[in-house]
Amino acid sequence: MSVTVYSKPSCVQCNATYRALTKKGIEYNVVDVTEDEAALAHVLALGYQQVPVVETPTEHWSGYRPDKITSLAVLLSA
């Protein structure tokens, strides 16, 4: 399953999200929306105006969400 984290530099919630994903053993790709205009347009099209935005094939959310990360880890381990 591909997991993408849309982020920007010096983002506290982004860093917390990376740490939580790594701790749960979830592989992810990071896309910097300040460097990638298409990624920024995608995030805005999803309805978000802040980062991090985490996107999986089945869902997406914004902000540091340990509950969602835990659910994702359970799903991946099943």
Image (spheres, rainbow, N blue to C red):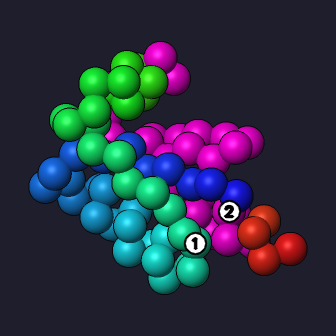
Q: Residue at x 38, y 74 (%)?
A: 19
Q: Left or right: where does residue 45 sit relative to residue 73?
A: left
Q: Left or right: where does residue 46 sit relative to residue 11?
A: right
Q: Quadrant of the C terminus?
A: bottom right
Q: In which quarter of the image is the N terminus?
A: bottom right
Q: Is mark 1 on a helix, strand or loop?
A: loop
Q: Left or right: where does residue 54 sit relative to residue 40?
A: right
Q: Which residue is drawn at 36% across and 24% down?
A: 38
Q: Residue at x 63, y 47 (%)?
A: 56
Per the model, the C-alpha gap separating discs 1 and 2 is 8 Å
**Amino acid type of the residue that numbered disc 2 sits on in the rendered structure:** Leu
On residue 72, the disc is 2
Q: Residue at x 28, y 24 (%)?
A: 37
Does residue 52 show up magenta in the picture? yes
Specify start and end residues of the magenta stretch as a single range. 45-74
Q: Residue 59's quadrant in the figure?
A: top right
On residue 26, the disc is 1
Residue 23: x percent and y percent? Answer: 49, 82
Who is closer to the viewer here, 61 or 29?
29
